[in-house]
Amino acid sequence: MKIMVVGGGGREHAIIKKLKQSPEIETIYALPGNAGMEGEAVLVPIGAKDIDAIVTFAVENEIEYAVVAPDDPLVLGAVDRLNAVGIPCFGPTANAAIIEGSKIFSKNLMKKYGIPTAAYETFDDSGKAIAYLDSLNQYPTVIKADGLALGKGVIIAQTREEAVDAIHSMMEDKLFGSSGCRVVIEEFLTGPEVSVLAFTDGKTVKPMVSSMDHKRALDHDEGLNTGGMGTVAPNPYYTDEVAAVCMETIFLPTIHAMNAEGRTFRGCLYFGLMITPNGPKVIEYNCRFGDPETQVVLPLLKSDLFTVMKATTNGTLAETEVAFADGAACCVIVASQGYPQKYQSGFPLAVPADTENEYSFVAGAKKNEEGVTVSAGGRVVGVTAVRPTLKEAVEAAYARVTSVSLENGFYRRDIGKRALAAKNDK
Ligand code: AMP
Ligand code: GLY
């Protein structure tokens, strides 16, 4: 079969590597992909948000199945448009992708259906938002832009001044464009965070192995929030007991709620959870695979990814096996110095070749005029190692990262540290 993957980062590279293992797939096109995927996918220079061009390409090239990986094209309706020309897709339609596209939608959904989440109020007027802050007078407090903001639309304000600044920059200075016209102000929760990606066909939900992201740029969770600087799987805080509670109080109720709203969700639903002293609560939903969660989750998947993806499309997930290996995985991201703010690109990039249990997932690379592969983006490459234990996986990932050659690259030295400490607690 000829299939295409929309997107161009490390997550998409992990998806492509896994799909390559499927005997049914002949050719994978990546739109736009990146230079690090050459040899594994045919790169097509069409941006992930250019829905018209994506549909035209798919029709002209007789694409038989499409995987739409990033949030933007999903929220913009890429799946709806591809379905309309008869191309089956992995990923939700726009009316279901709103679960990530609008935080106000997702918060109201959780309230309506009793799904545990932080207490909140929503505002479209900055004066009222500030009056609400003053009525609570409780810090830290959390301010979120309603729409998509590249993972940067969440401010944890430690003081009234920070909170007021956040509201002004989102609602008046339009730091995130129209995404910040409306905001959510919510209760600050505490506890370890867990990412759970789940396959669903709208009837059955099959969670993947749990993972832990490391969102801050610097060691000891210092520095700015990023898209994610590394991951481990499984997440030691996600015990069997917690998993059972999540299935009962969060996963199934969310699937049912979306159906009840006439917004059946199919694809990968990402549950960003916090294990609070009062039980697991939803911090956020994403309508897609996480990045870099995918880079530790898919290497542990034993089942054929393409078979599972098609089952979410066809409604046959209940009969389809989704099995994971027993071991652990660690992914360390190498980013450009300065990320997530200003950084330079264009430095020659060399990554170690894959082995049976180690991978390089390239997130940002292009060929320069001399034909040399160079960095192109904030996050440049993620190296993943799979081992029987988490400790071994972390050590192997750090051994491997020393073989990445990137002049202005930096990486965190403490990916997996918190997870290992939690394991030793038990
Ligand atoms: P989000 O983009 O919604 O995942 O938020 C980014 C990060 O902000 C999360 O991973 C949490 O670490 C933090 N965060 C978001 N909401 C809350 C909350 N209500 N309480 C505490 N931390 C939060
Ligand atoms: N790693 C967090 C996300 O994909 O949103």
Image: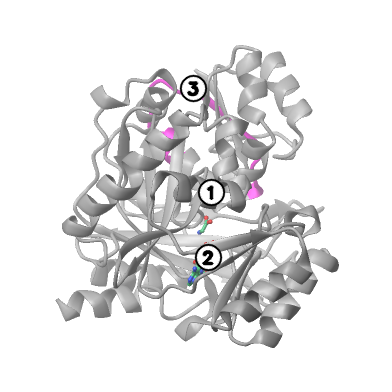
Please name the amino acid that badge 2 sits on: Gly
The percent coordinates of residue 2 (x first, y second) are 54, 20
Q: Is residue 139 above or below residue 170?
A: below
Front: mark 3 or 2? 2
Q: Earlier in the sequence, mark 3 or mark 1?
A: 3
Label for residue 228?
2
| Number of marks in picture | 3
Task: Name the residue: 71% across, 28% down.
Answer: 54
Q: Which label was assigned to residue 75?
A: none
Residue found at x 54% / y 63%: 120
Q: Position of residue 134 (x, y in %)?
A: 65, 81
Q: Amino acid at mark 1?
A: Asn
SS at circle 3: loop
- Amino acid at the residue labelled 3: Glu
Residue 80 in view in this figure: yes
The residue indicated by pointer 3 is: 26
Kindly identify the residue that appears in the image at 63 percent across and 24 percent down: 80
Label 2 element class: loop
Q: Residues within 10 Å of mark 2 (few under 14, many from 20)?
A: many
Point 32% across, 36% down: residue: 205
Magenta residue span: 17-35
Circle nearer the viewer, 2 or 1 = 1
Label 1 crowd bin: few (<14), some (14–19), many (20+), radius 10 Å: some
Q: Which residue is mark 1?
A: 108
239 left or right of 4 in image: left
Q: Is mark 2 within 8 Å of ligand 2?
A: yes
